[in-house]
Amino acid sequence: MKFTKLTGAVALGTMLSATAAWAEYPERAINMVIPYGAGGATDISARTIAEPLGDAVGKPLIMANVTGAGGATGSVAVQNAKGDGYTMLFARVGSHSVNPAMKATLPYTLDDFRFVTVYEINPVACAVTPASGITSMDGLIAKVAEGGVSYSSSGVGSLPHLASAMVLKEFGVANPLTDATHIPQKGGGAAVTAVLNGTATFLCTNSSALSSFVANKQMVPLLVTTSEPVVGFDAPTANELGKDVLNKLVGWTGIAGPDDLPDDVADKWGEWMAAATQDAKFNETMSARGSVIRLMDPIEANAFIQDQYKAFRDLVDELGMRIEG
């Protein structure tokens, strides 16, 4: 009897110790992987929420841009990480909606991740520089007909890549993949720079990546893919131009861990994000960039991402943009 009691006590003590260990998460800094380059929409969103999120977490957040392959390199780094909550990903529409839809040989699927939230939605805007002399979508399409037009993106298989091709198609360009030249860049910031320095004619990317350049009159917006005007963007909406199908082109940012992320860790992220997204400065900054802060719980986030994936897969099939190699 004494042996049985002792064994039970040891077992109970072990269980309590394990529970206490989990309750202490996080015990150290958390690595936050940003799968795109500095200055792009993902980077802007991640670094803007970093301070209020860090305050909610109570431990340092180590922000690292792990770039390459249209967001796949950073995503794989998190996919292969231990599912203990100490390596998390700022998942993005490009890395987790467009990439899976476009790339047949992508080294991960949506099932390889556990999404704890989607917290930001932003529309796409198409823009040129004042030096281009283009002031409307009609003007851009006329230039395409003349030849020599190019567009930049944050990489093959990124949202800007798909968005630009889709916009051209919807505005009557017969062969959007050949009538304009795609110039992929290493990240969203580099894609904007390519237009600013004249390497590319235009780009269609998230409003958050363009807002400061539009405000400083370095870029001229031609279109926003919304039904309602976007603050700070003096440009017609897709609906005003009779192209409401372009409303499908919407960006998002979320947070994900490896697929074996424990429930209690995921629950903590839900609590932290609920606090961080209430931060007034974060909301003011992101709203000024044309973003909509919309916090989704894991169930809603996963449903939303799956719907996005299907929409983009349908578009890829229609445009013939599937990348097999």
Image: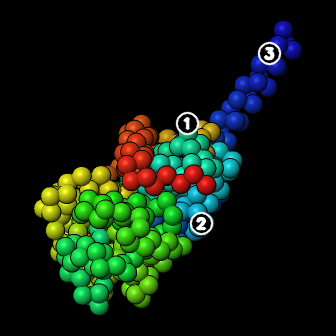
Q: Nearer the viewer, mark 1 or mark 2?
A: 2
Q: In this view, which residue lies farthest toward the left?
A: 240
Q: Are marks 3 and 2 in contact (CB under 8 Å)?
A: no
Point out which mark residue 5 bears.
Answer: 3
Q: Nearer the viewer, residue 284 or 183?
A: 183
Q: Position of residue 163 (x, y in %)?
A: 36, 61
Does label 3 or label 2 sit earlier along the sequence?
3
- Give the alpha-carbon distance from disc 1 to disc 2, as whole Å: 30 Å
Residue at the disc numbered 2: 68
Q: Nearer the viewer, residue 180 or 9?
A: 180
Quadrant where the image shows the C terminus: bottom right
Q: Position of residue 59 (x, y in %)?
A: 57, 60
Residue at the disc numbered 1: 263
Q: Are marks 1 and 3 in contact (CB under 8 Å)?
A: no
Point out which mark residue 126 bears.
Answer: none
For numbered disc 1, what is the local secondary structure?
helix
Image position of 140 with respect to 165: above or below: below
Say which quarter of the image contains residue 227.
bottom left
Image position of 70 with respect to 218: above or below: above
Local crowd size for mark 3, using a 10 Å CA cut-off: few (<14), some (14–19), many (≥20): few
Q: Is residue 260 left or right of residue 44?
A: right
- Give the alpha-carbon distance from disc 3 to disc 2, as whole Å: 57 Å
Say which quarter of the image contains residue 259.
top right
Which residue is depicted at the point 29% across and 65% down? Answer: 173
Quadrant where the image shows the N terminus: top right
For numbered disc 3, what is the local secondary structure?
helix
